[in-house]
Image (cartoon, rainbow, N blue to C red):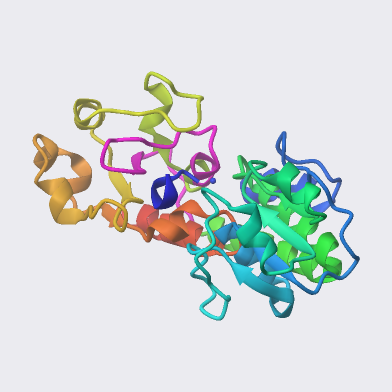
């Protein structure tokens, strides 16, 4: 699905306390398929934009020799034409990696057969998954201390932002748009957790298919739910904006449109669960303050 993949504080503090303890627990399937690379790999290939951000954030950037075509942050990451969606084992092997970070296990076995160690880091379901993956990457690359420091920094910043969120008796309603076919994120998803911590009531939670993580709503459903705020995580993939939303049939009467609370987001920032989750949560919190 490329850019459209969905790829997500008794507040944040309560949610993440267990993660910082570094127990090694995370979402099912988050454990590495193989982590027996050299203690300090010197030729790392990352096929996950989120993993790429984590690598550079913990100081492992100098060990990275290639990243996939969507790994556009940080700008100094060595982008190539490698695909994380349809990885080619031979093309990967051409970079002579001693460790490959993967978004799923599609080519894990094939890389093993080529003698290449790899670590599978699937999309996070919780903030705890984010911290767990940071620690996994730190351990695999020889940057464990830096990984722990990064986690502590993320936690501290999220807690500070959460403390500024207004606490209301009635939570304002929110619609999170993943694409222009009305796929959204319910409260069981990574994004849904952030919305909840920002004091918002997610309209996707009552939709058919809720608790699946990413239910598909409809224009009629959104209009009837009348959300107070709309976040657009499809500005790049689908060209959505404040004006395109306002032009949709029935949307001119939706509270978020009427009161100018339609918030465009950068798709990449909204779909990655790495260090920049702090920026994403800040954007969510800022919108909440305006309600």
Q: Quadrant of residue 156?
A: bottom right
Residue 168 on the magenta segment:
yes
Front-most of residues 3 and 10: 3
- Residue 219 visible in the snapshot: yes
Front-most of residues 115 and 100: 115
Instruction: Count the numbered circles shown.
Output: 0
Q: Position of residue 152 (x, y in %)?
A: 74, 63
Question: Does 216 appear above or below 174?
Answer: above
The magenta segment is: 165-194
Q: Would residue 157 be found to the left or right of residue 289 on screen?
A: right
Residue 145 on the magenta segment:
no
Front-most of residues 213 and 137: 137
Residue at coordinates 35% horizontally, 29% vertically from top-left?
Answer: 216
Q: Would residue 190 be found to the left or right of residue 43 on screen?
A: left
Q: Position of residue 157 (x, y in %)?
A: 61, 65
Most frequent secondary structure within the magenta stretch = loop
Front-most of residues 75 and 241: 75
């Amino acid at each position: 699905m490329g850019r459209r993949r969905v790829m997500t504080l008794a507040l944040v503090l309560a949610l993440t306390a267990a993660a910082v303890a570094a127990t090694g627990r995370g979402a099912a399937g988050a454990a590495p398929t193989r982590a027996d690379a050299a203690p300090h790999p010197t030729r790392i290939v990352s096929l996950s934009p989120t993993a790429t951000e984590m690598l550079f954030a913990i100081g492992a950037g100098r060990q990275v020799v290639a990243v996939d075509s969507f790994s556009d942050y940080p700008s100094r990451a060595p982008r190539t034409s490698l695909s994380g969606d349809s990885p080619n084992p031979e093309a990967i092997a051409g970079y002579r990696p001693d460790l490959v970070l993967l978004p799923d296990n599609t080519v894990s076995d094939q890389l093993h057969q080529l003698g290449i160690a790899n670590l599978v880091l699937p999309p996070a379901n919780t903030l705890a998954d984010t911290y767990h993956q940071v620690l996994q990457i730190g351990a695999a690359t020889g940057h464990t201390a830096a990984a722990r420091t990064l986690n502590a920094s993320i936690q501290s910043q999220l807690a500070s932002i959460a403390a500024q969120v207004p606490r209301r008796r009635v939570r304002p309603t929110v619609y999170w748009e993943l694409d222009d076919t009305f796929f959204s994120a319910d409260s069981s998803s990574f994004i849904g957790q952030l919305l909840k911590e920002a004091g918002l009531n997610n309209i996707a939670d009552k939709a058919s298919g809720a608790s699946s993580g990413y239910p598909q709503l409809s224009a009629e459903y959104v209009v009837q739910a009348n959300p107070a705020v709309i976040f657009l995580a499809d500005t790049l993939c689908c060209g959505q904006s404040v004006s395109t939303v306002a032009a949709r049939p029935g949307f001119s009467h939706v509270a978020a449109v009427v009161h100018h609370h339609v918030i465009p987001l950068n798709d990449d920032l909204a779909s990655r669960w790495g260090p920049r989750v702090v920026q994403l949560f800040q954007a969510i919190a800022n919108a909440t303050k305006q309600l």
